Image: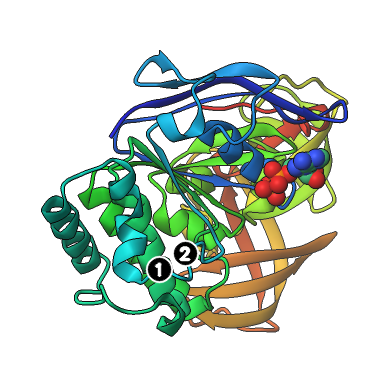
Amino acid sequence: MARLQVLALTRRYAGRAVLDHVSFEVGDGELMVILGPSGSGKTTMLRLIAGLEPPDEGQILLDGQDITAVPPHRRRIGMMFQEYALFPHFNVFENVAFGLRMQQLPEPEIRARVRTLLEQVGLPGYERRDVHTLSGGEKQRVALARSLAPRPAVLLLDEPLGSLDRALREQLMGEIRALLKAERMTALYVTHDQAEAMAIADRVLILHQGRIEQIATPEDLYRDPATPFVARFLDVGTLLEGCILAEGDPAEVETPVGRLWGFHRGAIRVGMRAWVLIPHLIRGASYHEDEKPSGPVNVLDGEVLERGFRGLHVELRVRVAGGVLRQLLSPANPWIRPGQSIRMHIPADAVRIWPVDTEGARSSG
Ligand code: ADP
């Protein structure tokens, strides 16, 4: 339990910044996920925070204290990796007890702590088991117990479920989150899997080419992506390239699917090229002539190409002039079928506009 602050952290390899002045804070007991494509700098970030390599610039603070120059074993930071980094010649007990022995705790205390942790990770009575007799999921549960045993102030997890199959991952995701929350552990969890990030995080930090694109709760990322990269990476909607026709909020923009009204992020001017996002799932969208929503609205006529059942949603592919949109809507629209002409009313406040030159620019908050 602690507060972790990262200030202007920078790491260069051969002159190229793989982390570029990254600043953020993980609150006491918060579970933050770092999500980004391969090569975005996620592992490097964890290695710097763990002290496995030094930053070129910047600082790392734990509860306000600068630990940038503190050696790894004195940082009170635990790590858990994707590979089963268990000691193969130790049994389960000795693996979990490892950090406790380093702390030279009395034997009865070690035994009690190991027993409690094995119960917490769903492996009661596994003390004497050899590591090579465990399944992949059991190994990662032992690895989690081992990393929590010495009560680190912060736990770093690097793709801890990366080598497990989908069903097991989904189960363990829930278990890891529940355990970290029960321990009120401050944790930083790295993954490249969007669904895993959304399921486990209190907040998600989206990393791209060594910079922060956005830090937000999972719901806010989908409701209000800060950049075109975030919108594309999370597949929030259809991104169109357009040109600004009128400034203001809403602004008007010419796109391949027609003129649209939308709200902009970043400074725009008439004539500027812009990215325009039409979300797949639009609150307040209507597909009936007689249900026109209030406020400024975009009207798009199209033809339904496909209707797919997705459980809680129905997914439509709709051909409109100049493109195809994917729309998710409630299954309570049984009349919308392939071949059907529909008129979509899309509120302007669902549409996002970014100047194209901010494609590389980031904001956080
Ligand atoms: P991620 O974990 O997001 O996949 P990494 O932090 O592993 O990304 O790597 C970020 C970038 O830094 C990549 O382009 C990678 O090739 C480069 N990189 C990582 N470690 C080294 C190193 N020791 N020497 C040179 N380049 C490195």
Horizontal relation, residue 65 to residue 263: left or right: left
For the point 54% across and 19% down, the residue is 69
For the point 51% across and 66% down, the residue is 84
Horizontal relation, residue 57 to residue 297: left or right: right
Disc 2 residue type (three-letter): Phe
- Residue 52, how many percent across, how many down? 59, 36
- Residue 75, how many percent across, how many down? 42, 30
Horizontal relation, residue 89 to residue 297: left or right: left
Q: Secondary structure at mark 2?
A: loop
Q: Mark 2 and 1 residues: CB-CB less than 8 Å, in contact?
A: yes
- Residue 165 can be seen, yes or no: yes
Within 8 Å: ligand 1 and the Cβ of disc 2?
Answer: no
Q: Quadrant of the N terminus?
A: top left
**Based on the displayed image, in which of its 4 quarters is residue 48 positioned?**
top right
Image mark for residue 90: 1
Q: Quadrant of ligand 1?
A: top right
Disc 1 residue type (three-letter): Phe
- Residue 234, how many percent across, how many down? 62, 54
Give above or below for 142 relative to 50: below
Q: Secondary structure at mark 1?
A: loop
Classify 10 Å Cα crowding around label 2: few (below 14), some (14-19), many (20 and above): some
Give above or below for 117 relative to 134: above
How many labels were placed on the picture? 2
Image mark for residue 87: 2
Mark 2–mark 1 Cα distance, whole angstroms, equals 6 Å
For the point 72% across and 52% down, the residue is 38
